[in-house]
Image (cartoon, coloured by chain):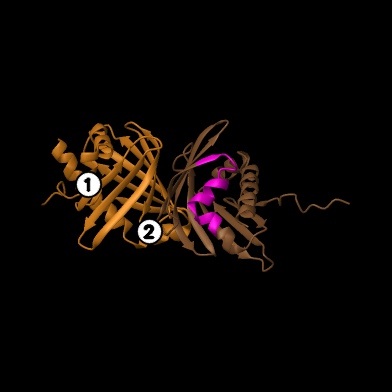
Chain colours: A brown, B orange
Amino acid sequence: METNTNMPEKAIVTKHGEREVRIERILNASRDRVWRAFTEEKLIAQWWGRGNKLVVEKFEPKRGGHWRFIEHTDHGVFGFEGRYREVTPQERIVRSFEWDGMPAHVAIEHIDFVDLGDGRTKIITVSLFHTAAERDGMMQSGMEGGANQSYEALDRVLQALG
Amino acid sequence: METNTNMPEKAIVTKHGEREVRIERILNASRDRVWRAFTEEKLIAQWWGRGNKLVVEKFEPKRGGHWRFIEHTDHGVFGFEGRYREVTPQERIVRSFEWDGMPAHVAIEHIDFVDLGDGRTKIITVSLFHTAAERDGMMQSGMEGGANQSYEALDRVLQALG
């Protein structure tokens, strides 16, 4: 009988209310390593773009700081940006998120880092959109698939961090 | 009997739903002149800061462009910024708005320019906040007084444009 130990986890993606999306994903790494992968520029550049080339134009992970990433894909070049509301080490990041293709359509992402106590870490991301239409549009544009691709790239980065 | 022709108009400020604020203000100037005062850097710098010194760090009034203003007051220095979603000449500006003191708490402002046909122009600004708490907090922080001060400074700019 085969085991699934080498299969990537799937993110659990659920809608809440009219404007929220919640994404849960377990990572096979300590919270300290996961935190580094979210807050060190060289590491986040390796996974946030789902394995695509990612140019980090700005990355200031602290309250009030800005971020701006450019993803280079086979289908084009996509810019994303936002600002940090909260960066609490090992625990929580709250930041705004928008895509250049829909400027000033802003979602707020609350990212919680939960130490599962067995060497694994759960990431809970709650995205609050400004309107129900924006939430539903983002879901239809492939948010779930994109999140899974990013987390699979993150699995590889965490494994390499050892 | 005194007339009130030299008294500034007062903005009409109303709450709508849980997350919106609507501000209406009539200006004694043509829509063309009002549009210029909102989209020319030298003009907006003279009124947006309520008569205080305003440093325009970035001002790109077009879809996807950014803006960033620094207001210098007797009580301190305050930064504001956002991005343009829509700039339709003489008709409409939609942009995001946030204050450095509450980073990544973002409101979306829809600003409509209505030609009243008698040489006056009505500005209707609908601000949609991300949460009810943010809307109520902004109202309590003196949004109405600040808007009136800005519009009175705008009256002076428009009169000088004459």
Can residue A135 be seen here? The reply is: yes
Can residue B28 be seen here? The reply is: no
Residue density around tag 2, few if under 14, some if 14–19, many if 20 or more, within 10 Å:
some
User: In the picture shown, does residue B47 fall above or below B136?
Assistant: above
x, y (%) of residue B52?
20, 53
x, y (%) of residue A50?
60, 43
- Would you say residue A53 sits in the magenta stretch? yes
Question: Which residues make up the magenta segment?
Answer: A36-54
What residue type is disc 2 on? Met
> Which residue lies most toward the left here?
B1
Badge 2 marks a residue whose secondary structure is: helix
Residue occupied by mark 2: B138
Q: From the image, which quarter does the C terminus of chain B lie in?
A: top left
Q: Residue at x 27, y 43 (%)?
A: B26
Q: CA distance from mark 1 to mark 2?
A: 20 Å
What residue type is disc 1 on? Trp
Q: Judge by depth and name the residue closer to the eye, B136 or B9.
A: B136
For disc 2, the chain is B
Badge 1 marks a residue whose secondary structure is: helix
Q: Residue at x 47, y 61 (%)?
A: A87
Q: Residue at x 17, y 50 (%)?
A: B7
- Image disc number at residue B47: 1
| Mark 1 in CB contact with mark 2 (< 8 angstroms) | no
Left or right of A3, for residue B155? left
Q: Earlier in the sequence, mark 1 or mark 2?
A: 1
x, y (%) of residue B156?
16, 44
For disc 1, the chain is B
